[in-house]
Amino acid sequence: MNVANWLAATARLRPQAPALLTGFDLDADYATFARRAASIGAALARDYGISAGDRVALFAGNCTQYLECLYGIWWIGAAAIPINAKLHGREAAWICSDAGAKLTFVSDDTIEALAEAASDLPASMKTLSMDSAAYRTLREGEGDLAPLSRETSDLAWLFYTSGTTGRPKGVMLSHGNLVAATMCYLADVDHATPDDVSLYAAPISHGAGLYHLPHVRMGGRHVVPDSGGFDPDEVLNIGRQLGNVVMFAAPTMVRRLVDAAKRRGENGEGIRTIIYGGGPMYLADIQDAIATMGQRFVQIYGQGESPMCITSLGRHWHADTTHPRYLQRLASAGPAQSMMQVRITGADGKPLPAGETGEIEAKGAAVMLGYWNNPKANAETLKDGWLRTGDVGRLDEDGFLTLSDRSKDVIISGGSNIYPREVEEALLTHADVREVSAIGVPDADWGEIVVACVVLEDGASASDQTLDAHCLNSIARFKRPKRYVYLDALPKNNYGKVLKTELRKMMGK
């Protein structure tokens, strides 16, 4: 099963339906979208010698051409390597080299960075700018009407992890993995219709980009904002004017969108669903989001190795305020998605009962084939089909998963485990605190102490003493920060995740 078949089918059934838009401008209907993908695929085979199983990279920001190229790659059975457009050229070159990419699609804003790292690229690799006249000529040709047949186990998406603990690892996702992720979306996250607007305000190169699959299958519109990224006012305007908008947003993006809606006196009219994940959504923040924008929210928990589909906290769970454990559920990431199993294991690798905290493991049809050319990492991460996520959490008696932290972020102070998220949740309920990240810093007496890196609301002031007293109202004394550091902003990556590694560097760890 080649996932490009979904585009071919939709082009036959809804040829004149609008498919690709930049802002409010139509770039292609479905017939044109599919013809371009087929033409790109034919050119890759004819002009660049690319065949089924070969790897083709995409090093570009969000644009409608990205989707054309992606489906062109799949059309001929090749595998796509999505590369974060914010990476340094040498980082992108290393990925191309490790994956053995035969060609990389670039854009005018990334081509120079990759050219500067030419010595690190595969010697025979070619580049082609999506913004060039050559590309526009290439996509206007003809190609096979039907995508090449593929097995469900064949490689489709080779996604490289962020590499926070060393070189990034290439996560191998098959066509079957992508089908499973799509079925999970339709069963557990949101429905999809031909009237939908799938808005790409988060990077298409990341897991959020895979959400185009259900909307291609159902014939919805795919909209890249004029800005090419996330601007909260632009998102609100698109929602009002186009309606039925569905989008993925990291929790920090949700916070900015809620702030913009408040400032404008709006509630997100026209935005049907905001799917959030990729970082901790604190209870106070999701409560504020619902109070401002209503029940438009769905949470997902996943990682590159099981993209966007380990658990899901659906819209109905957000709205079930009469449940006796409503707040606990709202603070969770929900139960396992339909094609997945989730369990918690202890240090000995054995499953733990409900309520106990340990490592989160996942198993199911969406879990990766493994890491590209990395048997050591495969042996460490995949055990009898179970994916060891490296995240820490607990399951309640109903199967709702509550995340604590990455295992490497757990702070051990005086022999006791302290989960940074507990500290962060406590501090965020203080009216003067806008953002916070808690980290462990070495200490001669305690092993580690908790340091809270705090961003205050504009014009607010707070002392260590007031924040300390506030913490003691909700968490144990041994968990409270022993030091507070006040910052103008927390360091974040391109996906809105707070970079605790950078905070530790700032603290001299």
Image: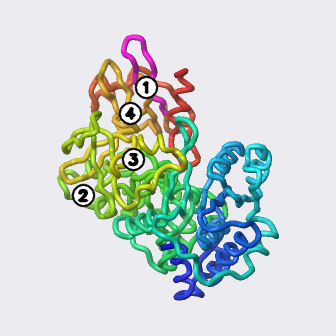
Neighbour class for label 4 at 10 Å: few (<14), some, many (≥20)? many
Magenta span of residues? 441-454
* Residue at the top extreme, as displayed: 445
Q: Earlier in the sequence, mark 3 or mark 4?
A: 3
Picture coordinates of residue 55, whole percent (x, y) = 63, 59
The residue tagged with tag 4: helix, strand or loop? helix
Q: What amino acid is labelled 4 in the image?
A: Pro
Picture coordinates of residue 62, whole percent (x, y) = 64, 61
Q: Earlier in the sequence, mark 2 or mark 1?
A: 2
Residue shown at the point (62%, 53%) measured from the top left: 83
The residue tagged with tag 2: helix, strand or loop? loop
Q: Is residue 433 left or right of residue 238?
A: left
Nearer the observer: mark 3 or 4; the answer is 3
In reply to whether residue 337 is colored magenta, the answer given is: no
The residue tagged with tag 1: helix, strand or loop? strand
Alpha-carbon span between mark 4 and mark 1? 8 Å
Q: What amino acid is labelled 1 in the image?
A: Gly
The residue tagged with tag 3: helix, strand or loop? strand
Q: Which residue is mark 3?
A: 382
Labels 3 & 2 near each other (Cβ < 8 A): no
**Residue 456 to residue 445: above or below:** below
Labels 2 & 1 near each other (Cβ < 8 A): no
Q: What amino acid is labelled 3 in the image?
A: Leu
Q: Nearer the viewer, residue 342 or 498?
A: 342
